[in-house]
Amino acid sequence: MLSRLMSGSIRNLEREYNCTVRLLDDTEYTCTIQRDAKGQFLFDLICHHLNLLEKDYFGIRYVDPDKQRHWLEFTKSIAKQMKSQPPFTMCLRVKFYPPDPAALKEEITRYLVFLQIKRDLYHGRLLCKTSDAAMLAAHILQAEIGDYDPGKHPEGYSSKFQFFPKHSEKLERRIAEIHKTELIGQTPETSELNFLQKAQMLETYGVDPHPCKDVSGNPAFLAFTPFGFVVLQGNKRVHFLKWNEVTKLKFEGKTFHIYANQKEDKKIILTYFAPTPEACKHLWKCGVENQAFYKLEKSSQVRTVSSSNLFFKGSRFRYSGRVAKEVMEQSAKIKRDPPEIHRAGLVPSRSCPSITHGPRLSSVPRTRRRAVHISIMEGLESLRDSAHSTPVRSVSHGDSFLPRSRSMMPDGAEGSSVIADEAYSPADSVLPTPVAERSLELAVSRQSNGAPCSIEEEKESEAGTPSAGDGAEVGADGREGGASASGGAEQVNKFVLSVLRLLLVTIGLLFVLLLLLIILTESELDVAFLRDIRQTPEFEQFHYEYFCPLRRWFACKFCWLGGPLVNK
C-alpha cells in the first residue's frame, strides 16, 4: 500500500512543475501547474493574482537557452513551448502598449503600464532628449516620494536616484528643480498619469528595437510603436509606416520584408537582415500579432498568415487574442469598485532598481558624462535581465484612436525625422537577440567610431585598452562587402532550392494521380468508393475514349521497341 501511494505521488509530481513569473514591480509569483497546462491558464492565474481585468495589453515573456526571446503563446502547452527543463522562469510585460494610457478604465492597469514605461526609461528603450527626460524623472520622483521636503531631501538628493542608464549633474539639478517647484501637491495617481501622457508623445513610446542590417550592411533597428512600424538609424527615424499602410510582412531565413502602400498608390518594399533566423521569425511574429491587434476591427477578421508565398514553404502563424477596438469596448463595460493598489516604490529591483534604492551608475566618471539624451543603445545592456519586448500599435481606427498631437502631425512627419542629438551604435552584448555573425567586426567599428558598446567596455577603455586603428576599420568594411556578396549568393541558392522543392512536389503529386488511375482502370479491387467511381458515366467515357486508346498506343510502342531485343 505504501509503495502504491509513493508511486502515485511520484507520477503526480511528474505531471506537475513549478513556474515563476517576475512581475513588473520585480516581485515574483510562483505557482504549480499541470504539465499539459496551456499558456492561457498561467496568464489567468497571474491576472487574478494582480486583480487585473484589462489584461489584453499584457503578455508573458521568456528566453530560450539560445538567448532568443519569445512571447508565450496562450493557445499552446507551456511545456511544449519551453526548450529548457522545469522549473520555468518568465516575466510579465506590456505586450501591446495602449495608444492613449489616460483612456484606460482602471487605475491598476495605468499603474502597471507606468511601471513598464519607467522600466523602458531606465533601460534606455524610451529615447528622449534632456528636457523630456527631466520632466519624466521628476514625475517618477513625485509619484514615489511625494512633495519635496527639505528635512527629508537634502541638497543633491536626486543624484541618489537611478532613472536612466546614465546621469549628468546638469540633468540631476533640473530634475530636482522641477520636482521642487512644478509638481507640488500632485498625488501618486496624478503624477503617474502625467508621466504616461508625457511618455506617449515621444517617438519611441513602446519601442523594443530589433537589431538588423539594411541591404547595404548598415546597422538599423526595426521597431513597433503604438502608431506603426519604424526603422531607426543613427539619430533619425528613417522610415515610418502606419499599420493601415502595411500590406504584408514576410521572412525567409534571416531576411525580413515589409510591403506597404503609401499615398498615390506608391508601393514600397523594405528589406532587412536579422542576426539569426530565430530572431527574424520572432520579429515577424511580433509584427503579425500587432498588425492584427491594431489594424482589424474585430477578432473574427484575423486570418492565418504564411511567411512565404512558395508552395509548401514557410511558417504559418495566427494571432489568437482580441483586437484593440474590442479591448476598449470591453473595458468600457467594467463596473466594480477600484481595486487596492500596493505601490512598490520601496521594493528593491534586480533589473530596474527602485529610485529609492538604485545607486547612481558610476561606471563613467562624472566629468565625462554627457547631458543625457538617453540613447536607446546605452541602456540595452539591461534588456537581457528585463526580458521585455514591445509590439506595435496602429492608426487604422482613425484619428480618434490617436492622441491629439499625433493625429495633427503634418504629412511630412511620416518620413525621416531626427529623434535624438546623437546616434546610437549597437553592440552584440546589449542587443535584444544574439548576434551570430561578425560580432568582432561590430565591436571594432564601434571602438573606432568612439562609441562605447557597453558599460564593461567603457571600463576597459578607461583602463587603457587600446582602440582599433583605421586599418581595422577598412578591413571591417571589406569584410562587410564580402558578406553582402555572399548574402546575394545565399539568396540565389535559396531560390533554386525552392524551385527544386516545388518541382519535386509536383512530380510526386502526378505520380500519386497515375497510381490512382491505374488502380481504377486495371485492378479488380471491389471497394465501395472505387466501384462508385467506375460506374459514373464520366469515368466510363474517359476509360473507353481516352484511356484504352492510350494503353494500346503504349503497348504497340513497347512491342516495337522490344521486338528486336527478343529476336536477338
Image: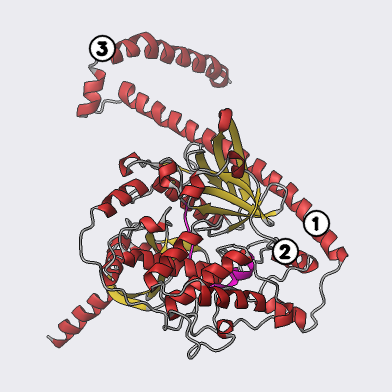
Seen in the picture, residue 418 relative to 560 is either above or below; the reply is: below
Name of the residue lying farthest toward the bottom: 151
- Specify the quadrant of the image occupied by residue 27: bottom left
Where residue 445 sits: x, y (%)? 77, 64
Q: Amino acid at mark 2?
A: Leu
- Specify the quadrant of the image occupied by residue 192: bottom left
- Label 3 and label 2: CA atoms lie apart by 71 Å
Name of the residue lying farthest toward the top: 545
> Residue 18: which numbered mark, if any?
none
Q: Secondary structure at mark 3?
A: helix
Q: Amino acid at mark 1?
A: Asp
Q: Earlier in the sequence, mark 1 or mark 2?
A: 2
Q: Secondary structure at mark 2?
A: helix
In the rendered image, residue 245 lying in the magenta stretch gets the answer no
Where residue 505 sits: x, y (%)? 48, 35
Is 198 in front, or is 298?
A: 198
> Residue 442: which numbered mark, if any?
2
Location of the C terminus by quadrant is top right
Q: Earlier in the sequence, mark 1 or mark 3?
A: 1
- Label 1 and label 3: CA atoms lie apart by 72 Å
Mark yes or no: residue 435 visible: yes
Location of the N terminus by quadrant is bottom left
Q: Amino acid at mark 3?
A: Pro
Report the residue marked by disc 3: 537
Where residue 134 sits: x, y (%)? 57, 70
Mark yes or no: residue 387 visible: no
Q: Is residue 226 left or right of residue 372?
A: left
Give the magenta range. Answer: 377-392
